Each structure stands twice: as structure tokens, then as C-alpha cells.
Image (cartoon, rainbow, N blue to C red):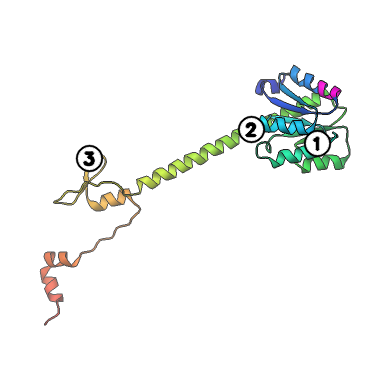
Amino acid sequence: MEKVADIERPDADILVVDDTAANLHLLVRLLAEHGYKVRPSINGRLALTAAQISPPDLILLDVMMPDMDGYEVCQHLKADERTRDIPVIFISALGDTLDKVRAFTIGGVDYITKPFQTEEVLARIRTHLTIRRLQQELQAQNRQLAQKNAELEEALANVKTLSGLLPICANCKKIRDDNGYWQNVEIYIRDHSDASLSHGICPDCMVTLYPDIYEEAEPAD
């Protein structure tokens, strides 16, 4: 059988938590044989510390442990920003439906009942490592897209904002653009801002251009 996980994630880091030495040894050996990097932990408190210092790609978590059981460990993991997204697979001798429901309610992604089958454990690990990898890729793409959108908005804002020193002809009042061409003021403003222009004639120009009309409109003394 082809080992999909070994091809996709040969360096996957898995934290295995179980207070029973025989179970812990069995899982560590199984995962190591399939190319995973395995970190064993004999209790919940040590597991939390290990996960916080160096977050693994996945956690196999026993339920029935002294001092701090697997449910409590999972709750602490999900409450911590550093570890909340790590997939947690519960592995326990408790097979009651309520136990499984509780595991999923507090954030577990899967539940394996002991005694487990080797191929089942490996298949579930492969599945959740693949899902996690796809989630991370999607998150990375979303971050890149958000950054590009922000850069585009900033660029558009800069293009549509008049700023800096504008070279203006002292005679005809044209403006020299960034490419060295001289443009009418209204064309330059249209291309470099969001302003809309309308045209009219001021009173001084009215006198100069249409003196007859202006004199007719002038009230008599």
C-alpha cells in the first residue's frame, strides 16, 4: 500500500500523549516507521508545555490520564492562540457515544477507540494532516490576497491624489506631467484626481471676451 502521508508530509511532527507506557511505545514506533517525527509525552501537563514551545502538526491524545485528562488538555490547547489550530485526534478505550460527542464538542477532529487498528490510525492521521496542510495553504493565499488588495488600494489612492510640486507654464498655465508632456490644467486634474470639472466664465473674463453683453447687463446709474 502506498504511504500517501510519507509522500506529502515526510517531516510531519506528531505529539503522542498517553500515560500508559506500552501504548505510548507502540504508537511512537508505528509512526516513526512511517516516516513521522514523533514526540512522546506521558501526561497532559508535559504535553501542553511541549505543544506551546514547539507546536506539532497533529496531536494524538489519550482521554483517561491522571491529574489532567485528555478533555482538559484539549480545552487548554484550543484556548491558546499558539495551539488552537492543531488537529487533535482522541484515542481512548472509552467507546460511549457521549464520550465521543464531548471530544468533538471541545475541538477534537477525530476519535479512535482502543484497541485500535494500525491502518485505521495511519489513515486518519493522513487525512487530517492533508486537511491541515490545505487549510494552511488557503490561509497563506488569503493573506497574500489581502496584502495585494491593500497595495492596490494604496497605489490607486496615490494615482488619484494631487501632491508634490507641479510645473506650471507662467504664460498659458499648462502643467507638465510625469512624462514631460504639457497638458491643460483640466486634463491634468481629471487624470490625477477624482474631481469632476464643469465649465463657466468668471466675471472678469466676461468683460474681456463679451464687453457688449456685459455692458447691456450692467444696471444704469
| Residue type highlighted by circle 2 | Leu
Residue at left 43%, top 42%? Answer: 152
Q: Position of residue 117 (x, y in %)?
A: 84, 25
Toward the bottom, the furthest residue is 221
Q: Position of residue 26 (x, y in %)?
A: 82, 21
Image-quadrant location for residue 70:
top right
**Mark identifier at residue 107:** none
Q: Nearer the viewer, mark 1 or mark 2?
A: 1
Residue at left 75%, top 31%? Answer: 47
Give the tally of numbered discs: 3
Q: Main secondary structure of the magenta part?
A: helix
Depicted 214 relative to depicted 43: above or below: below
**Residue pointed to by mark 2:** 134
**Mark identifier at residue 70:** 1
Q: Position of residue 107 (x, y in %)?
A: 74, 40
**Callout 1: helix, strand or loop?**
helix
**Callout 2: helix, strand or loop?**
helix
| Residue type highlighted by circle 1 | Gly
- Label located before the other in sequence (3 or 1): 1
Residue segment shown in magenta: 21-25
